[in-house]
Image: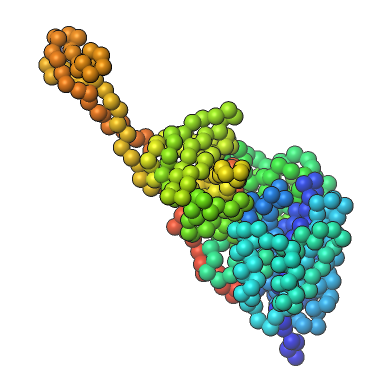
């Protein structure tokens, strides 16, 4: 007999603290548990959803998880209970900054409710408040589980994650390898040469594995969390191939593939905002002209100014922006650019932290020079203000000055910070032209986990 099937969508957030755990690890353990206990069909990979990176109270990646499952309706209560237990066991409950929260939404068929989708977009590009999250949860009949008494802030990410990665959205994958518990907090043993080899053999199907500018492995995080390594890429098979190329100096617990909005620029708006309308903490796009030649300031940061018809803003590339600073340094007054980033306002003044820079047009830069002697071809010498020029060799008098066009040492195009300084959501240059919109929840590529 066919049991009644229903779709259960699960949003999870805020389980980890700076000192322990990772929400993806709680999800990994949860998937392991529910697949062993119940007849569960995954309609999608577990989702790793990054939200507005500029939210001031989030110091880590601001990532939530979601699962889209088809289950037997008779298992609903048992599965919900098991998920809550697993998330609870794998959260840093004692830390003041965690607020582990789970949101359950049950439907007959898999679809994303419009209002949940809108909520996700807002959580990605703006600031949402908790009241909105509560109102929406009630409106859609979501079942919320707060695993501890606290700020309930985890509801925002858990609910928003349910509106992410719908058909039409660009996406990537990340394969996360988890350490055995006894290794948490210890130095990660991943062979650097094997990372470089993996990078060379698998890119552009994987990306941001290694930063060649600073010779730094990027697939290993640095904190005390359970993640041993994370490989990002375009397709699940590329990631399962890539992980086999790595040499680990420690046994790992297992790995799982997440589908994610990382590396898609999902947080960046398509339309630009006027400088006078800039709001703090929102990712923005600005179009305008450089209005003051760039300078390098203490700390190695580079600042300049951009102006549109509504006002002027400072733009800054911090030291960690690496060579992006050199790009900004090459810009000159009048160059037309697009700037993507996050703005901070100080009274009337606005400073935009540059996350992506598109050089659209460059002005001609000319330098005033003494003319060349028409006989000897040597540069003449000025005889003083408004006195004209004279060749020092043959004495010929020349009119002048001459205006010489300086070759601009910069190409038009898109510039990003180096991989080590890119945000999770930043679309790396290697992904341009590889955007996908065709995900169909038909069949997951096997294997997508190893427990
Ligand atoms: Zn001469």
Eyeballing the image, is 30 above or below 441? above
Q: Residue 62 location in percent, x, y?
A: 68, 54
Location of residue 167 in the rendering, given as x and y in whole percent from the top left corner: 55, 71
Q: In the rendered image, which quarter is residue 63 located in?
A: bottom right
Residue 194, by quadrant, is: top right
Q: Residue at x 55, y 52 (%)?
A: 278
From this viewpoint, is residue 37 visible? no
Vertical order, 94 against 80 (above or below)? above
Compared to 129, does 190 lie above or below?
Answer: above
Quadrant for the N terminus, please: bottom right
Q: Position of residue 289 (x, y in %)?
A: 41, 44
Q: Position of residue 387 (x, y in %)?
A: 21, 16
Q: What residue occupies the far bottom of the structure in this picture?
A: 1
At x 49% / y 31%, what residue is drawn? 295
Q: Residue at x 55, y 29 (%)?
A: 297
Which of the 4 image quadrants contains residue 81? bottom right
In the picture, which quadrant includes the C terminus?
A: bottom right
For image coordinates 75% across by 75% down, the residue present is 138
* Residue 324 located left or right of residue 9: left
């Amino acid at each position: 007999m066919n049991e009644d099937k229903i779709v259960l969508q699960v949003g999870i957030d805020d389980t980890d603290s700076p000192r322990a755990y990772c929400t993806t690890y709680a999800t990994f353990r949860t998937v392991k548990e529910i697949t062993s206990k119940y007849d569960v069909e995954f309609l999608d990979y577990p989702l790793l959803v990054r939200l507005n990176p500029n939210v001031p109270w989030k110091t880590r990646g601001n990532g939530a998880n979601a699962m889209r499952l088809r289950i037997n309706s008779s298992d609903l209560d048992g599965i919900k209970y098991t998920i809550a237990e697993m998330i609870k066991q794998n959260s840093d409950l004692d830390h003041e900054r965690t607020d582990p929260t789970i949101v359950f939404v049950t439907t007959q068929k898999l679809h994303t409710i419009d209002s949940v989708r809108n909520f996700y977009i807002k959580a990605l590009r703006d600031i949402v408040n908790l009241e909105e999250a509560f109102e929406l949860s009630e409106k859609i009949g979501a079942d919320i589980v707060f695993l501890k008494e606290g700020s309930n802030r985890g509801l925002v990410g858990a609910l928003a994650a349910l509106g992410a990665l719908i058909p039409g959205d660009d996406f990537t994958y990340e394969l996360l390898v988890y350490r055995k518990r006894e290794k948490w907090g210890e130095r990660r043993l991943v062979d650097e040469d094997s990372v470089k080899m993996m990078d060379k053999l698998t890119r552009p199907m994987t990306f941001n594995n290694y930063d060649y500018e600073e010779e730094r492995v990027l697939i290993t995080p640095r904190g005390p969390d359970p993640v041993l390594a994370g490989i990002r890429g375009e397709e699940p098979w590329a990631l399962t191939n890539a992980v086999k190329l790595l040499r680990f100096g420690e046994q790992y617990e297992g790995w799982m593939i997440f589908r994610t909005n990382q590396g898609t620029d999902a947080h960046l708006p398509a339309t630009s905002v006027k400088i006078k309308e800039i709001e703090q903490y929102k990712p923005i796009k600005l179009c305008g002209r450089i209005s003051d030649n760039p300078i390098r300031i203490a700390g190695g940061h580079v600042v300049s100014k951009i102006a549109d018809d509504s006002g002027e803003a400072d733009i800054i590339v911090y030291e960690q922006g690496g060579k992006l600073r050199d790009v900004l340094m090459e810009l000159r007054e009048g160059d037309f650019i697009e700037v993507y980033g996050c703005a901070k306002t100080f009274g009337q003044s606005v400073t935009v932290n540059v996350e992506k820079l598109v050089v659209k047009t460059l002005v001609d830069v000319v330098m005033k020079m003494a003319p060349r002697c028409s006989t000897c071809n040597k540069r003449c010498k000025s005889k003083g203000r408004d006195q004209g020029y004279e060749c020092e060799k043959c004495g010929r008098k020349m009119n002048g000055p001459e205006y010489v066009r300086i070759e601009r040492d910069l190409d038009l195009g898109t510039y990003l910070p180096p991989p080590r300084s890119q945000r999770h959501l930043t679309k790396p240059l290697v992904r341009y032209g590889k955007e996908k919109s065709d995900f169909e929840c038909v069949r997951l590529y096997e294997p997508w986990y190893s427990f």
